[in-house]
């Protein structure tokens, strides 16, 4: 059975294997043991801490095959984007340049470097093995985080954002980077992203242009790349769009990928999930897949199970599912349809 | 040849001239009504009826047969009625010692910095008269006039030099920048500014600073460079003390050169003298000579020699100035080295 749970230090080598395979733009998953160790330690500390409002915490989960002990995916949440260093985005803006006399009415699209999304909670570090893309496990790998947020709202902000890796070609070159960032750094997109992972994005962001950029001046390829999703990131993009995230307002300052955002309370897995009491038994056949989480912190677990649940009634879990979640008869779980 | 104020009677000749200037000379549009208005203002200016903000000292170059073959002008002040725009070419540095990055990005800042200065403008000499001293007389006569009537002009004098364009009149700078915002041809924008329709500039121009890395290479290369036809004019004004301080035209990026009025050679070195008629002799110098009148201003060039506070000229030069022995003149050697 595949179980989503907080990462532990013992997972380090497995996590690094996942990180090594993740696309170059996922800078929250650097292929660097030191940084990954810090990430797991930070998550451990955050889960252990008493928290009454979102601050510097970060949470990091892994998707484990409980039979083999292998990890098949991971994902994370940063409680507050830009808590310890500025969080940069490009905001899409429109200016109207209008001349009544000449009857010219131009809508001019401008990108402005901003910190608007500072303080929002940030979904990060999403990775699933290729074989799981499109499966319910891929959903679990992303949305288990949202069930965690639903259970611990005091630990998160009122809004959640996520940066989706943008378009880059087979050689790892990003047209948006080549047209914008490269002018200010004189390094390739891959080099820049590698540096971001090793140092920090802020480190580079501080060198980015602080005056707004007039989009009509950018080459067509760069304009087309704005808001485009990297094929490998399509899975996480699709999942989150179904969750009610919105796009179009912000893009990534490096590769032009979309930055999604949503009100926390309006996210589907949060708004539509329910907390129900558990009964142990043999689930009836013909159910549908649900994501089920135990609502705990350090012992947080989430699984996918076929259930024939009727709203307002307790949920009947198999012994195996209950064991995976670490819950018994009479406990409560949070569930939402996959 | 003499330079004198333009009069209403010159109008047909001026219209003929304007038709042959082509794009790039915004202050001499081939529009009969506008030209008539302009000459009317020029007459008022020379009689002292115009405030400095509106003053338009429009001169013509007339040959000894009374034919008008060129024009030049000085505006008392720019930008006091409508905003006067230039780009200031500045620099943005993107640098990090730790990342071994040092990028210099020339950046254009929209500015009204040159507001209130006097402006040399509208220089045009018929192509079949671009010989001998005609060009220098036509251009430098203005400087001698400024020297005589210093109080009518600003502390700085500027001159906008025509920028680079190709054989079809296409400006690479316009194609890379202005076109995106104005959605019209360079020649049309140029014409509209020439006929005084300047409000549209403010309405349609990009207001934020522009990183030149977002312009085409052709456009970047010609910022601050003059059209080959304008090179001689640039060289001449540099000889008078004008220099390029980073201000360029917002349409074609031609340089706006400037000089402190008091330090212009013709202003600094010219002197008031008494006219003597005789034989300038073998050691004579070519002088630029003004009859010290405003409304009846006449300026010419001629061989002359200084002798005990008098300027000795030949009878033809005196006749061109319509002066007699003992009359006052202001004179300066036509060129720095005589």
Image (tube, rainbow, N blue to C red):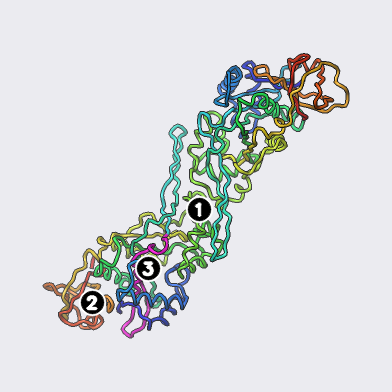
Counting residues from the start of the chain, the first of labels 1 and 2 encountered is: 1
The outermost residue toward the left is: B308
Q: Which of A297 and A24 is in front in this view?
A: A297
The quadrant in which the C terminus of chain A is found is top right
| Percent of width and height locating residue A63 | 70, 23
Which residue is under mark 1? B217
Closer to the camera: disc 1 or disc 3?
A: 3
The outermost residue toward the bottom is: B65
Identify the image quadrant of residue B326: bottom left
Q: Is residue B16 left or right of residue A267?
A: left
Chain containing mark 1: B
Q: In this view, does B154 lie to the left or right of A221?
A: left
Chain containing mark 3: B
Q: Residue B291 carries which label?
A: 2
Span highlighted in magenta in the image: B55-84
Identify the image quadrant of residue A336: top right
Q: Does the magenta stretch include residue B233?
A: no
- Cα–Cα gap, marks 3 and 2: 22 Å
Mark 3, other Cα within 10 Å: few <14 / some 14–19 / many ≥20: many
Which residue is under mark 3? B121
Q: Nearer the viewer, residue A56 or B120?
A: A56
Closer to the camera: disc 1 or disc 2?
A: 2
Mark 2, other Cα within 10 Å: few <14 / some 14–19 / many ≥20: many
């Amino acid at each position: 059975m595949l179980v989503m749970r907080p990462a532990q230090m013992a997972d380090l080598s497995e996590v690094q294997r996942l990180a090594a395979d993740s696309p170059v733009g996922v800078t929250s998953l650097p292929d660097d043991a030191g940084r990954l160790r810090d990430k797991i330690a930070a998550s451990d500390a955050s889960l252990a801490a008493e928290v009454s409002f979102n601050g510097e915490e970060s949470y990091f989960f892994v998707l484990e095959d409980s039979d083999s002990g292998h990890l098949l995916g991971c994902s994370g949440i940063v409680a507050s984007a830009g808590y310890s260093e500025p969080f940069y985005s490009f905001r899409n803006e429109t200016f109207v340049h209008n001349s009544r006399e000449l009857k010219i009415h131009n809508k001019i699209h401008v990108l402005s470097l901003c910190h608007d999304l500072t303080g929002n909670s940030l979904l990060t570090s999403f990775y699933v093995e290729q074989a799981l893309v499109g499966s319910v496990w891929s959903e679990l790998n992303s949305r288990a985080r949202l069930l965690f947020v639903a259970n611990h709202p005091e630990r998160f902000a009122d809004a959640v954002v996520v940066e989706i890796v943008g378009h880059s070609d087979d050689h790892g070159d990003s047209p948006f980077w080549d047209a914008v960032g490269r002018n200010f750094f004189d390094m390739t997109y891959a080099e820049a992203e590698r540096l971001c992972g090793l140092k920090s994005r802020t480190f580079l962001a501080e060198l980015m242009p602080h005056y707004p950029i007039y989009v009509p001046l950018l080459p067509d390829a760069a304009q087309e790349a704005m808001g485009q999703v990297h094929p490998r990131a399509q899975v996480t993009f699709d999942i989150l769009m179904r969750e009610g995230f919105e796009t179009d307002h912000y893009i990534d300052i490096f590769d032009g990928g979309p930055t999604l955002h949503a009100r926390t309370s309006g996210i589907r897995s949060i708004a539509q999930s329910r907390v129900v009491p558990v009964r142990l038994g043999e689930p009836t056949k013909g159910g549908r897949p649900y994501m089920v989480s135990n609502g705990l912190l350090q012992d947080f677990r989430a699984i996918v199970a076929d259930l024939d649940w009727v709203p307002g009634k307790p949920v009947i879990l198999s012994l195996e599912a209950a064991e995976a979640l670490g819950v018994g008869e009479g406990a409560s779980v949070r569930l939402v349809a996959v | 040849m003499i330079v004198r104020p333009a009069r209403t009677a010159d109008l047909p000749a001026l219209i003929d001239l304007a038709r042959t200037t082509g794009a790039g000379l915004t202050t001499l549009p081939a529009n009969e009504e506008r030209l008539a208005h302009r000459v009317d203002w020029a007459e008022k200016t020379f009689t002292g009826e115009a405030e400095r903000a509106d003053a338009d000292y429009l001169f013509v170059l007339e040959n000894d047969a009374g034919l008008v073959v060129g024009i030049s002008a000085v505006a008392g002040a720019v930008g006091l009625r409508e905003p006067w725009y230039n780009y200031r070419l500045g620099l943005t540095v993107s640098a990090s010692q730790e990342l071994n990055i040092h990028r210099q990005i020339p950046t254009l800042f929209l500015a009204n910095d040159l507001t209130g200065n006097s402006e040399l403008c509208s220089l045009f000499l018929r192509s079949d008269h671009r010989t001998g001293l005609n060009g220098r007389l036509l251009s430098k006569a203005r400087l001698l006039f400024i020297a005589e009537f210093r109080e009518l002009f600003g502390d700085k004098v500027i001159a906008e030099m025509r920028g680079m364009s190709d054989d079809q009149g296409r400006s690479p700078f316009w194609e890379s920048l202005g076109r995106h915002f104005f959605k019209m041809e360079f020649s049309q924008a140029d014409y509209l500014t020439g006929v005084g329709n300047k409000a549209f500039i403010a309405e349609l121009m990009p207001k934020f600073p522009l990183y030149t890395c977002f312009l085409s290479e052709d456009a970047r290369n010609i910022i601050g460079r003059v059209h080959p036809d304008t090179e001689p004019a640039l060289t001449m004004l540099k000889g008078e003390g004008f220099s390029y301080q980073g201000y360029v035209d917002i349409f074609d990026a031609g340089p706006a050169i400037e000089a402190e009025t008091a330090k212009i050679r013709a202003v600094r070195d010219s002197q008031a003298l008494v006219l003597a008629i005789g034989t300038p002799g073998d050691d004579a110098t070519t002088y630029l000579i003004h009859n010290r009148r405003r409304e009846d201003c006449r300026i010419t060039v001629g061989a002359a020699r200084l002798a005990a506070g008098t300027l000795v000229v030949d009878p033809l030069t005196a006749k061109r100035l319509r002066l007699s022995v003992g009359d006052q003149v202001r004179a300066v050697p036509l060129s720095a080295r005589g």
